Amino acid sequence: MSTNHHNAHLVARSGVFTGLHPGMGIAAKGMVVAFVLFTVLNVEFAGGIYGAIRGWIETALNWYYISAVIVIFAVCVFLMCSKWGTIKLGDDDSKPEFSNFSWFAMLFSAGVGIGILFFGVAEPIFYFDNSGAFGYPNNPHADMQGNLDMTVARGIDAMRVTYFHWGFHAWSVYVIVGLCLAYFGFRKKLPLTLRSSLHPLIGDRIYGPIGHAVDLLAVFGTVFGVATSLGLGVSQMAAGLNVLFGISDGIVTKLTLILVISVIATVSAVSGVGNGIRIISEWNIWLSIILLATFVAVGPFQWLMSFFVTSIGDYLWNFVPMGFWTASEPGSAAWQGGWTIFYWGWWISWAPFVGMFIARISRGRTIREFMVGVMFVPTTISFFWLCMFGGNAIWQELNAVGGPGVAGGAGIIETVRSWDLPAALYGAIGNLGTTSWMGDMSWISWPLSALATLLLASWFITSSDSGTLVITTMLSMGDDDPPKVFRVVWGLGEGFVAGVLLLAGGLGALQTASIAAAFPISFVLLAMTWGLVKSLAEDSSAVMPPAERTAPDGTRLAQELHG
């Protein structure tokens, strides 16, 4: 790799910041530390401000988030069907780096993280409930259909809303970011950082303050995105340890879990994506298959299959009008802000991180192959997963003594009403053995709970180490192999942020941080989308790799494959 004289000024060659852009490194750490200190020094004041910001975004800007996601989804559909679908993400003769199986497995690991395990039972049950215990309707979509009682019809509506939040609209946000990074990185030979997507709009100014700001936003979204899911994840792991070993699920257990997981994730980030991460990812897939297969086999198989087919049909019939629906009634608007807008914000703030991961594994595929693979494979698996977990819980409630929501019934609705979401998964697992069509299989609850808890930890480790690699890649200006010392700093730093925010105000502050970060990131995503379409329309041909392997500011350019 040759360098040019600009390198010396921008990527440090010696001293504390060797291999990093010092300004970016300092700014990123300063930004995260300032946010955390502000939160911790006056929790109530900070919580009030975050709450006000989140409330403002969810009520005043719900139309904006809904419109932004619709635009991104529409562009994805357009590109999938367009004449540009045959363009390679790389040179015209480049071949995919990974087999289809490996590629799908890695897409699956990007999609089925902590989120689907955490919300898989709790979210469908929340929408199935009709108590309005939180001061707003549990599921305005079901209410509008007239399905007010807890029946199978309301269960189908509950699954439709769950699919909506984890389905095509959500994944289109990841798809567009991954496509932009892969196209500009591998085909246009620009640096593999978020700023490159803006090149058609602002040219070489991406190497100045605007580019720095865009990448810093992405770092912010990644840090607080990873911290949010670590906060969610350890709450559920603590609930699991409580079920398994009677260990208290209090703050000490959660902080201990954050520490242990952050250390393992940091070690694996330092070792690189080579052996450690690949092996953990493969194990994740096999263990997930075992957990999912048990839910399918031990649960009411025939009922679940027909429930899956009906609810998927319901989603496919309704997902376009649902995507456009903007609540106007106060109760429905509160529900939409707390659920749909929260999810859109969460997906947008995670997009730079997951998008870069998807781009890195997709070199050499055509645009159409990329779009179809990333849009349909993880969503289909997610839908099946959500239906088997949520469907089992809904069936348990429908068939409980006294019917759904009655005290002494299946108990899952009660758990969700008391907002103990982490425990909902273990409640469904506990009921699984006692309600099985195979007779009494209550012995299965302990090993299944243990498997779920282990999976929560291992899924999180693979998310966290890739998050660390993405952050350090951006701060080292696109280096595929960022300095190991910074991987340690950021890996442990993510855990520290999660721990401090959990102590300060639990998941509320974390969730608010995600939504707040998503607002500016959404403008960047819309600009990237415009830049991509503009570049495809003007000149979609692959650029020859430059003789100089670095950009004017020392940004490393996307590496070509050799051999």
Image (cartoon, rainbow, N blue to C red):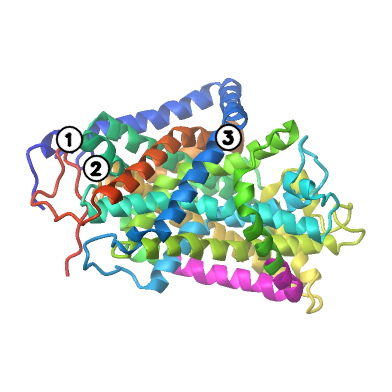
Task: Say above or below: 264 vs 59.
Answer: below
Q: Tell me the crowding category of disc 3: few under 14, some 14 to 19, or many 20 or more residues within 10 angstroms, Cα based.
A: some
Task: Identify residue for label 1.
Answer: 10
Question: What residue appears at the point 13 percent right and 39 percent down from the top-left corner?
Answer: 7
Task: Identify residue for label 3.
Answer: 63
Residue 427, by quadrant, is: bottom right
Inter-mark Cα distance, 1 to 2: 9 Å
Q: Write the start and end of the magenta stretch as one range.
A: 281-308
| Contact, mark 1 vs mark 2 (Cβ under 8 Å) | yes
Task: Identify residue for label 2.
Answer: 477
Percent position (x, y) of residue 493? Answer: 41, 40
Kind of residue at disc 2? Met
Kind of residue at disc 3? Trp
Question: What residue appears at the point 57 percent right and 44 percent down from the top-left corner?
Answer: 343
Inter-mark Cα distance, 1 to 3: 41 Å
- Between residues 132 and 485, which one lies in front from this camera angle? 132
- Between residues 430 and 480, which one lies in front from this camera angle? 480
Q: Main secondary structure of the magenta part?
A: helix
Percent position (x, y) of residue 184? Answer: 27, 50
Kind of residue at disc 1? Leu
N-term-proximal mark, 1 vs 2: 1
Question: What residue appears at the point 13 percent right and 50 percent down from the top-left corner?
Answer: 549
User: Which dot, 1 or 3, sits closer to the camera?
Assistant: 3
Q: Secondary structure at mark 1?
A: helix
N-term-proximal mark, 3 vs 2: 3
Q: Tell me the crowding category of disc 2: few under 14, some 14 to 19, or many 20 or more residues within 10 angstroms, Cα based.
A: many
Q: Secondary structure at mark 3?
A: helix
N-term-proximal mark, 1 vs 3: 1
